[in-house]
Amino acid sequence: MSDTPRSLNFIEQIIEEDLRATHDQKELRFRFPPEPNGYLHIGHASAICLNFGLGLRYGAPVNLRFDDTNPAKEEKAYVDAIKRDVAWLGFKWDTERYASDYFQQLYDWAVELIKSGKAYVDSQTSEEMAQQKGTPTRAGSPSPFRDRTVEENLSLFKRMKAGEFPEGTHVLRAKINMQSDNMLMRDPIMYRVLHKAHHRTNTEWCIYPMYDWTHGESDYIEQVSHSLCTLEFLPHRELYDWFLDQVCEPGKLRPKQREFARRNLSHTVVSKRKLLRLVEEGVVSSWDDPRMPTISGLRRRGYTAESIRNFSDTIGIAKRDNLIDVSLLEFHAREHLNKITPRVMAVLDPLKVVITNYPEGGVEWLTAENSPEDDALGSREVPFSRELYIEKADFREQANKKFFRLKLGGEVRLKNGYIIKAESCTKDADGNVVEVQCTYDAKSRSGSGTPESLRRVKGTLHWVSVAHALPVQVRLYDRLFTHESPDTQKDTDFMEFLNPNSLEVVTGYVEPSLSTAQVEDRYQFQRLGYFCVDPDSSKEQLVFNRTVGLRDSWAKIQDAK
């Protein structure tokens, strides 16, 4: 690890300036505030790493707060999934909070704003409200209900709370400035009527606060020092501060909102609405489908928490949105998996090899090293027999000098085993090779110490013994979209860019040491890539997901098209 201190990102620079000017380090507190209306995705991972990383850097607490103000879209199942994902990434929150914890306090503050003439009940339709709010180039006009008396507003608001009105009939608006250049300041809505059961409060409330009213006040209640949001909330900062002006008491810490850029990932979408559409239309099997950019999907595919944290650290924090190539995420997956995964042998497209001079019925157990990266992973015994499977692509009847795999008259070494020579092959009625007949050099076994074992041949192949091979289902995943930015193309639905080859399911054969593999166990299938045991596995059949290949082949494949 380098001893050179890394430079501070601009968020850390803001915090350092505040510590020098106004804040004591003991006052620092951060929060991660997801809405429980879907699963967290890779974009959230960056926000999680930022907030919890700051907590670790400054020894400050970090709250996990659920922004649960829209019961129409929120579920406890999403809450549970979010908690599971944050914990899996390796972070511990100080306290678990909910915006719904503050419903009564928010309501009481809203009543005070009505009493001070800073909020009113508006009875316009949503269409009328949109019209009178104006446009970015045309100032808004006052609502015909803007000058209701305090008494009338209080009465209507209490009746809204009591459930006397249907949805859409009334809203509570802050009375700010209908001429403001910032449209968010043109009398924003604070409450709307929603007759929906809430996952925590059930039917106790039938009015629910809007995000802008809830956000800053929740930060204030929790005494969050720095409220970090993505860049689209920059225009909201003025309203965030206005609402805080109405409730902050002298001597209490006032939260500060600051914004950082989204880091969008290529060849995917991260909008919860679009991800939900993929689930509902059956494009993917679920929120944790391994093709999804959700944290749950990445975990199921075989990504490690460390690889995602390293990815987030590499892309850093910026002030402008940009598109990050998914290859960078895959690089971090390979880099970490290479260090921690045992090597095993698997064949996904089998071709039978018969070693004609090997004893029929003979079996020997060869010692194989589990990892050149970690001696602690030890070794295992692999069965070798007369009949083996190799990959079809590893044999050609005839090939040029640059083909270093098996060809008629040519020799290769079998990994951890013997040198074999292809003598002949058998074809089916369509001319496809279905079996290769080989001979082996009985003195060439790897590690035996004989001169023959040290003889060099240019090709080394992985293999499995036919008699001992364990048939498994293997799911070969690829990028979900063919376009690097599928949701930013004008006049084209993002679904038009779905990759028809994002999933291929094959029957493969693995060595018998994998018979005890457990869900989420990760392996390197030698020469093929990194694979993970899927939860769909059963005692009868293991299911493996391909996490990433050994190399980034996407660009090469696209260039060849």
Image: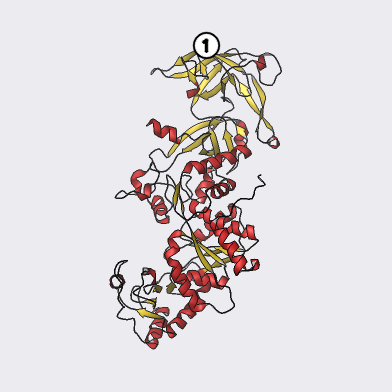
Percent coordinates x, y for residue 529 in the rendering? 54, 34
Q: In this view, does 442 lie to the left or right of 547?
A: right
Tell which of 373 and 104 is nearer to you: 373
Q: In this view, does 484 lie to the left or right of 294?
A: left
Percent coordinates x, y for residue 485 in the rendering? 39, 46
Count all numbered tags in the image, as a single digit: 1
Residue shown at the point (45%, 18%) measured from the top left: 433
Q: Is mark 1 on a helix, strand or loop?
A: loop
Tell which of 428 and 144 is nearer to you: 144
Percent coordinates x, y for residue 26 in the rendering? 65, 67
Q: Quadrant of residue 467?
A: top right
Percent coordinates x, y for residue 6 in the rendering? 61, 50
Q: Is residue 265 above or below residue 100?
A: above
Q: Is residue 290 above or below residue 28?
A: above
Q: Is residue 441 left or right of residue 558?
A: right
Residue shown at the point (46%, 68%) measured from the top left: 198
Q: How crowded is mark 1: few (under 14 residues within 10 Å), some or many (20 or more)?
A: few
Q: Name the residue under label 1.
A: 409
Please identify the quadrant where the C terminus is shown: top left
Q: In this view, does 255 lie above or below 165?
A: above
Residue shown at the point (33%, 76%) measured from the top left: 169
**Amino acid type of the residue tagged 1 in the rendering:** Gly
Q: What colouring style does the render use?
A: secondary structure
Q: Can residue 95 be seen in this view?
A: no
Please identify the quadrant where the N terminus is shown: top right
Q: In this view, does 7 lie above or below 343?
A: below
Tell which of 58 and 75 is nearer to you: 58
Q: Is residue 294 visible?
A: yes
